[in-house]
Structures are given as structure tokens and as C-alpha cells.
Image (cartoon, rainbow, N blue to C red):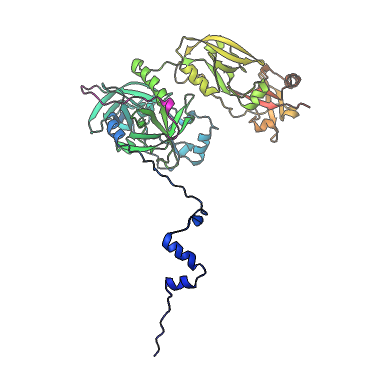
Amino acid sequence: MTTTRSFRPSLKTVLKTSGVAGLAAVMLSTGIPAAVTNSFAEPVRITAPQQVPSFANVVDAVSPAVVSVRVQSRANPVSEDASNGFSFDFGGRGFDDLPDDHPLKRLFREFGGPNGGPQHGPNGPRAERGPHGKGGEGRLRPTSQGSGFFITEDGYLVTNNHVVSDGSAFTVVLNDGTELDAKLVGKDSRTDLAVLKVDDKRKFTYVSFADDSKVRVGDWVVAVGNPFGLGGTVTSGIVSARGRDIGSGPYDDYLQVDAAVNRGNSGGPTFNLEGQVVGINTAIFSPSGGNVGIAFAIPASVAKDVVEDLMKDGSVSRGWLGVQIQPVNKDIADSLGLAEASGALVIEPQAGSPGEKAGIKKGDVVTAVDGDPIKGPRELARKIGAMKPGSSVDVSLWRDGKSQSVKLVIGTLPDDKQEAAAETTQPDEPSQPASEKALADLGVTVAPSEDGQGVTISQVDPDSDASDRGLKEGEKIVSVNNQEVKSADDILKVISQAKKDGRSKALFQIQADNASRFIALPIDQG
């Protein structure tokens, strides 16, 4: 029997029979020649790798200042929503306060819980109100929980308004488990801030607010709070964005962070690496109700001023202009002859308001306050709101194609139900159409209004600019280029003058029931 042995050539044999034997021998003995290595691209190499920072020192220092806040009220607790709808907290204003066509409301209507709205914010389920909007007469029941932090050694602490707003009794739980009673000092729904006070002989560890003007997108932050009632939980991330508007009101100016923030974190602090509070966690946006890396915090600069007022007076006094306004887009700017799309367009001054008394009219554009340019409604709202009631200011306006100025005395914003200095109104549902008269170039058919105020839109061409800009049947055109109109002829007369003035657009004031807005429509230059 013959045994066949497999032949496995040695490396030496291969090298002897290879056409590159000489080169291989050199490579084996001396390494790859320089001429060969230079033909390859240089790899990326970090010679001094940056060390990921540890947050332990920050956490050790600030944790004693962060507390859990438990709230009780004489009401029946609401069961938690079992759906997987989006969860969002609106900084003290209800979901129903948003305009019907607000992008967040449309999103919730499509994906959210019953009635299209979220059922709870990051602080957990809220309490049901009893008869006549007041708490029931039963015993105290737990209704919400959140987070907070001490800002003085004698026991003043900050949390969210929406955590404590329905509460009758408050308990603060320290990081060592000690429970202490607290009382409500003051709250402010517009910024969703509240101040509690613990009366105790001990001196509390407290933290300070940072200068958030130095906060940059990409900076490390640490959030400490009470998610899901666990207490003393630390998460980290970065500042994702600044100046976020989430539709909760005219004072929106949130920091967006990607540190894990969940229900129960509301009112808790977000720290920089120096242990200073850069923001107060107040809202989350999530398809599951839990953290997905999108959280919003009230900036320290906003919180500091509000908290000082609450500690001093128990409330916040804000300046009040008393006008309804909307943004100035490019079309509106073109129709008014403005060089750029900025400022705040006045829809209507409120009767008896400081703005009306000073002579501000519908169709005016507020361009500056005391010489400081105004870019839009939110900036105007914050500017006026931060002013002391009774102070005198100069308001620059754009009216009839030129700049002018009025002097006025800032009023006091009456209450939460009053609109602040910059609210955007939205159209309501249309009424029934009246008889028709065509304005073909504009894409609308109009007829005299029954009450003699403006003209009623009876038909809108679906392929027209009017339709694209949201005009609806049943709405009224009450003015064009700030001139009142009562017939189609009036409209055509104003448009004719606008063409002579070289304008490519005309500004239409549209009214639906008690709401009003401005729309710029292109006009035929032919």
C-alpha cells in the first residue's frame, strides 16, 4: 500500500521560486522600504487623545442641593395615560392653548393620546380639578412629583410651576432621605417657575445660577433630579441648541440638551462643569414618554430674574404694551416697503392699552424699542415684559412707508389670561358665503358684508396665491394697505395706487369672527 504525502512548500522554497524573492527577502530582514511606504496615504492619528471628563467632582458638590418635590392636593389623582403617544410639557400652559394649526398640535393629533393631546408632562400625572375648578374637599392625595434645588442656605428652592400649581401641601426630600415640609412662596405660569421655602434650623447646601450667555452649543452639562420617583439620579450630555421656541408662550427661549431627562426631572437643575445651574429642566419631547435625547431647560438668565421677583413679592410684574402682533415675512415686508423682513406687525391694539393710548395703529410695524432693533414678536414680548411698569419708552414704528416714533408709558400685564406684548393670532373657521363679485386677479370672489364692515370672501380659487396664503371662504377683508374697504371697487382702487407706487404686493387685513391677521398678496403689475 502506497502512502501519499501532501507537499507543503516552505516559505524559503516560495521565495526562491518567486519573481519577487529579492524584494521579499529585503522586506523580511529590514522592513518595508521607504519608497513603498510613501506610496500609501497617511492614517489619521491622535498623538494626545483627549480624556473624557469625569463628572464625579461636580456631582459630589451639587447633589446635596438637589431635592425631590412631592405634591399633595385635595383632589382625585388622574390615572396615567397608557398610550404610546407623544409626551410634552408646555411650560405651564395647556395643550388646548395652542393654535389648532400649530405644528406640535398637528403632530399630537396624529400620534398622540385621546383627543389628540398628551396626557402628562415630565413631572408625571396631574390632578383632576374638583367642582368649580377647585380641589375636592377630600383628604390630601399625592398628585405629582418633580425635582428642585436650593438657592439659599436658609431654605429657598426652585422648581417648576407645573409641578406645584395644583398642590395644597408640599414635601421636600433631601438626598439623604430626610423629608421636610415646604410652603409655596410664589409661582409664575408664563415661565413655568415656582419658589418653595423650607423652614428649618439647618443650613442647606445651595447652588448658584451661571452666566448662560457664555453657554455654547456642544458644552458638557449634567442633569440631577428625581426621574420616575427614583431620586438622586445623575445624567450627562451636551447643550444641543439655544433659543428654542416650543410653542408654550411668548417667552420661549429654551436651552435644548441631550442629557437623559424623564418624568420627575421637571424643576431639576442642569449644571455646567463648574457646578453652576445653566438651566431648569421643564419639558421633554418623546414618542414613548421617556427620554429620547430631546429635553428643554429654562435658561439661567430667565430663571434668575423671575426667581428674585418671586422671593421678594410672590409674583412677577411684567411690562405690558397691549397689542396683538404677528411676524413680518418677506411678502409682508415687500407690501409695506420694508427693506427687510423684521419687526412685529400690529394686528390690533387692545382698547385702553398703553399702545392704543400712545397712538399705535393696526398695520404699524414695531421696529425698535428705545433704539434696540426688534427682529420679531418673541423679541418684542421679552423686551416689553422685562421692563418695569410705569417706565417711559420710545417705540419706533414703520407706518405709511416711513419711520416714526411714539413715546408711551409701559403698563402692567394684568393676569395670565391677558395676552402679552406679542401674541400671534390664527384664523378661525369660516362662516357661510354671501353673494359674489369677482376679483379674478387676486383669486377671490367677494361681496359686501352684512354688517357693513369690510367685504366677505365668498369663494377662493384653489390654484391662486390667495389660497396658497390661507384665505378661506367666509372670512372678511377689512382693509388693504391699512385703508378700510367696503367693496370690491375699494380694493381695486387701493391696489391701483399700490401699483403706481411700485409695490409688487398689497397687505390685506383678514378677519374671522373676533380674530384678525395680515396677509400679503401679489398684485399684477401688467
Quadrant in the picture for residue 473: top right
Residue extending farthest right: 526
383 left or right of 469 in image: left
Whole-percent x, y for residue 146 in the image: 33, 32
Q: Main secondary structure of the magenta part?
A: loop
Asked whether 514 or 244 is in front, the reply is 244
| Range shown magenta | 199-218
442 left or right of 383 in image: right
**Residue at screen point 27% across, 28% down:** 171
Whole-percent x, y for residue 70 in the image: 30, 31
**Residue at screen point 34% across, 23% down:** 195
Residue 386 seen in the current view = yes
Q: How many marks?
A: 0
149 left or right of 493 in image: left
Residue extending farthest left: 201
Asked whether 233 or 230 is in front, the reply is 233
Q: Is residue 256 magenta?
A: no
Picture quarter with the N terminus: bottom left
Asked whether 155 or 238 is in front, the reply is 238
Whole-percent x, y for residue 401 in the image: 67, 16
Q: Is residue 212 magenta?
A: yes
Picture quarter with the C terminus: top right
Residue 139 seen in the current view = no
102 left or right of 453 in image: left
